[in-house]
Image (cartoon, helix red, strand yellow):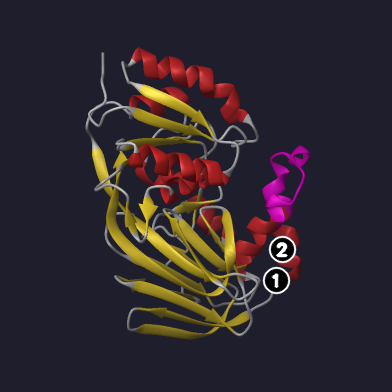
Amino acid sequence: MDASAFGELTVIASPAAGDGGVRERLPDLERALRDRGLPYVLRVAGSAEEATRTASEALRAGGRFVVAVGGDGTVQHVLNGLFESGRTIVPEPVLGVVGAGTGCDLLRTFGLPGDVEGGAGHLAGDNVYPLDVMKVTFTLPGGERSTRYAHNLAEVGLGAAVARRTSGLPRWTGRARGFLGFWLAFARSRVEHVKVEADAKVYEGPAFNVVVANAQFTSGGLRLSPRSFPGDGVLDALVFAGPRSDALTLLPRIFRHGDHVPDPRIHELRARIRVAVEADRPLQIVADGQMLGLTPATFQIMPRQVLLKL
């Protein structure tokens, strides 16, 4: 029998994740946890706010080990519950992730299984990895500033427009949602004038998309930032400065192996402190698949804030 090295698990599930598939897999998850002798409490969160609040309450009650069940959006909601006033509520909280078939991109970066049985197996024992986190400060439509914590990668411009369009499509479109969302967003996209600061380095000029990455994958397996790893204390900024048609011609290389970099029309910048993005007009921002707000925005690296359970 395996046991938890970090005390009782607070398992926070988003039943709507994976087009509702997470709810169907919860009995299998509970059985897998019991089989491994892992003490747990299961909390089913009906909203993003509830997932964040539940994670915070678990740490304030003396817990340390919180598990997100769902995709990258669920992970982000739970991750934000680990922070308060710019720091973690307890030192080195432990974050477990069970993808439950949702295609969680954080798991892909680490090569971890995305199914319930494999994910539960990685919750036992004491293997952890110190995970970097992005602190994203952005602008709300009314001009106010807001902050979220993100674990994976963010996009400004076309990538955010695709995410917004896709999220608005009906679920009956199935696997075609991403394809339709891309074309709807692409048809209305344009090259923007942006300014991207990565510590002391600056790019100013045209771009149709800006990526600020802590990890490698997005959109269910798109290896958009292949040089990133969320434990090196670095944020990678990729500025796609070519014509809009590059969004089409680069796709096969991105899907294949993420070998679209180096490329003369993709400017690569690295930051050990922060990346700042401005544009001539407010541009949408998406991080971990979640719509955040608008530019101007800053992305601050927070090294090794959380222990990711491996």
Q: Amino acid at mark 1?
A: Ser
Residue wearing tag 1: 189
Distance, label 2 to label 1, CA atoms, is: 6 Å
Give the secondary structure at mark 2: helix
Residue 33 point in image, percent of width and height: 38, 19
**Is 80 above or below relative to 192?**
above
Q: Amino acid at mark 2?
A: Ala
Q: Residues within 10 Å of mark 2 (few under 14, many from 20)?
A: many
Q: Are marks 2 and 1 in contact (CB under 8 Å)?
A: yes
Q: Residues within 10 Å of mark 1 (few under 14, many from 20)?
A: some
Can residue 72 be seen here? The reply is: yes
Residue at the extreme front of the image, as rendered: 61
Residue wearing tag 2: 185
Q: Magenta segment range? A: 165-180
**Is 17 above or below relative to 39?**
below
Write the residue at 30% across / 38% down.
64
Q: Residue 140 or 110: which is nearer the viewer?
A: 140
Q: Is residue 178 magenta?
A: yes
Can residue 269 be seen here? The reply is: no
Residue 309 point in image, percent of width and height: 31, 37
Write the residue at 31% across / 16% down.
37
Left/right of residue 228 with respect to residue 286 in the rendered view:
left
Residue 138 point in image, percent of width and height: 52, 70
Q: Is residue 107 magenta?
A: no
Left/right of residue 284 with respect to residue 104 in the rendered view:
right
Residue 234 point in image, percent of width and height: 31, 65
